[in-house]
Image (spheres, rainbow, N blue to C red):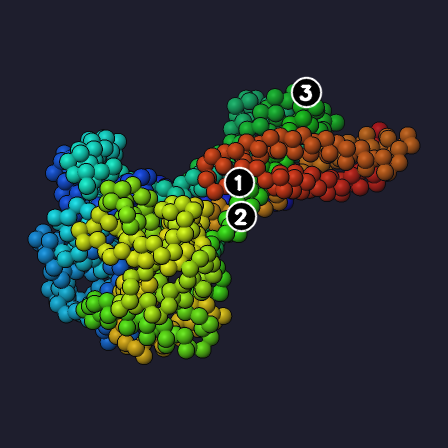
Amino acid sequence: MRRQPAFAAAVILTLGLGIAANTAIFSFVDALLIHPFPFRDPDQLVQIRSMRGGTLGMLSMREVLDLKERIPELESIAAHTSSEGGYNYSGDGPPQEWKTILTTGNLFEVLGVPLQLGNKWPDHDDRERDYRVILSHEVWNDTFGSRHDVIGKKITLDHAAGYQIDGVAARTFDYPHGIQIYRSLGGFAQFDQRSYRNVVGIARIRRPYTIQNLQARLDAVGHMLSVEYPQTNGALSFRAVSFRELYSGDVKPYLIVLQGAVGFVLLIACANVVNLQLSRTLGRSREMSVRVALGASRSVLMAQLLTESAILSFAAALFGIPLAFWWVKILRDTIGVGLPSWMTIGVDGGVLLFTVGISLISALISGVVPALILSRRSVINGLKEGDRGASGGKLTLRLRNGVVVLEIAVAVILLAGAGLLIRSFVELQNRDKGFQSNSISTFRVALGWKRYIDQASISRYYARALQELSRAPGLESVGLSTTPPLLKQDVSEPHTVQAEGQSVQEALQNPYVSSQNVSENYFRLLGIPLHSGRYFSESDNIDSEPVVIVSARLAKRLWDSKDPVGRRIRYDPSATKPGAFRRVIGVVGDIRNGELDGEPELDFYVPYRQEADGNQYIVAKTRLSLSEFRTTAERALYSIDPEQSIFDFATYDERILETVWQLRLSRTLLVLFSGVALLLASIGIYGVMSYIVGQRQREMGIRIALGASPGSIQRLVLKHASIVGACGLVIGIIGAVVLGRTLKHVLHDATGVDPLAFIAAPAMLFAVTVAASALPAWRASRVDPAITLRAE
């Protein structure tokens, strides 16, 4: 390395880029797919949900008890609300909103994570309205100064006094994600009503049983319950999901594709090093022949050359690891993946061990071929003075050409794959959502249940909130909704609707609908078109006839081609106390409510003045920055109730992008590492063409001496480069087609074939090949025949 610093630097830089790319991606793979969860025996933990008509839903507490009693494969089972709510806390400073789930007291026991302080509340508090809470370590530290005397202390939440602190979670505990308060389930869940589904089950499978054994038993129990209780459990089944799938199921195929892609990047880097090693090795043929003549065996030569290659590979790893740290930080910050605190994406011991492994693989790939070629060379030929600088013969030339073909093919595959994902991402973003999200900012309000105890007080607060915000400078229009589209909120099990004239049994055959409570200007604000009838107005209040607006798909599903305006329907006819029939006053356009790439849902809209909900999203059309919007909103709403917190500020477009972060991750990384592959391929092609021209210098001199023009010499070199490039492009296009089909199969939102990507990628690589060969071709045409022939 000291004697040949340029060669060593080239190898270290080339391999370092490949090692850094693989290390960066593996840090994501390790965190999301491999790293053990901080729970006892996490492979035995599952989440259990109900399923009806292909749609996942919640469990009732009665069903949780059924599963506990009827399934011996379960060691234990807990239950908690699926999506986090919020509890308002007013301390010495501004009001805070603490993210909360309601849970049975045995949640920590089922997960196998003991509390740092205190104990769980008694089991009977799961059934009774008793104010018991467990604090997260973060809240205990930030709000209560890590004092041990908080156990047993009572605090005020949601303006209600008497919440007793029973315990503090461990520092590393973060489940499901970002929860700050765990509150007793008592008073929220109904243990005697099977149709009241509002929790998910968290269960531990008894060893030696597996999730497959559990699922078989769940299917049997689901069938038994549907027979025993057809009114509530008819056609209802249960599904168990492992914790690994729960946290990383959606991202797993993307990471597998990316790890394969950066494996190709490392392959290109190794191919470049093979060419560098060949050049260096052939220059050492005399040295190796002397070693053999002095008694060295072929295995000794192989060992020496592979050792040298390994040293260079580990030096490349030392260069690549800091680069990987930097890439990981940039990617993590850019993509903004929301994960539990214990799923840390970074370069830790396991990732460094992986780096050592790929460094060894790189050493073998880049060192074994040159070592084999050199160890097979004749001792006599190697000792001849004229052998120094020899090209290595036709075999070596073919090997070099093959390496270039491989580099070009792999680069084409990567660039085409990146093009496919970019195209898919752009199409997904441009897909008609059914509403407009640009220039819209959002935040949430969760009214304290003690102060806002009935629908009248909730409606008054939000009516005044909309009034104050509408007057605020910089806000063009303001509305609200309980469940705005594409926010992936996990709410209670969806219900169906009953059209007037249908029996309850007939209504249960209707599809599930998405119900929202909205303000009267909500549709205009989001640009949801009115097909017939009218929008809500302020006169649609609690004293007027109950009304509803339905989406076009729901109207067609219930009434086919008949005009739905004026007809009556009601939501959830199987409830213990079904709501009143509502008159349809309007039909609006369909929107994509659940998934950006999914089908529009069946939507059922109710005016918030008639059916108030304390938890609402405020949506506002504004040109203000998010920080300015937050300041404006806080000033307006704190004037109504200075003790009521508002939280979770984000633009609507940011919220939508969070739902497709897997595709953003794969797109960003594939583009980045395709660029690295293109750079490495360009360097490799230039290096090989320069070497080949150098080895053919004598031939070029004779051609020029015999009358060949400089232009014909350039064409000769470029023709050779074009033939090699064309072979690589053909193989690369075939590989890109295979990759496209694989991506379409593995990633449901990927485009299988994109003509633009399949044309642009080969064209770019062909241009790179010609450009990388242009300088060596020019040098070949400038060879002085007199100097070349004088050496003869």
Determine whether label 1 and label 2 are within 8 Å by CB. yes
According to the picture, the residue beneath numbered tag 2 turns out to be: 427
The local secondary structure at tag 1 comes to loop
Left-right relation of 392 to 255 = right
Q: Is residue 145 visible?
A: no
Quadrant holding the N terminus: top right
Q: Position of residue 144 (x, y in %)?
A: 21, 68
Image quadrant assignment for residue 755 = top right
Q: In the depicted view, which residue is nearer to us: 608 or 111?
A: 608
According to the picture, the residue beneath numbered tag 1 turns out to be: 751
Q: Position of residue 387 (x, y in %)?
A: 72, 27
Q: Residue at x 44, y 42 (%)?
A: 255
Q: Position of residue 240 (x, y in %)?
A: 26, 38
- Say whether disc 3 or disc 2 marks the residue closer to the N-terminus: 3
Determine whether label 3 and label 1 are within 8 Å by CB. no
Q: How far apart are the alpha carbons under marks 3 and 2?
A: 65 Å
Q: Residue at x 67, y 26 (%)?
A: 398
Amino acid type shown at disc 1: Thr
Q: Residue at x 12, y 59 (%)?
A: 129
- Answer few, some or many: residues within 10 Å of disc 2's Cα (few below 14, many 20 plus, some between 14 and 19): some
**Is 786 rendered above or below residue 488?**
above
Q: In the depicted view, which residue is nearer to us: 589 or 296?
A: 589
Amino acid type shown at disc 2: Glu
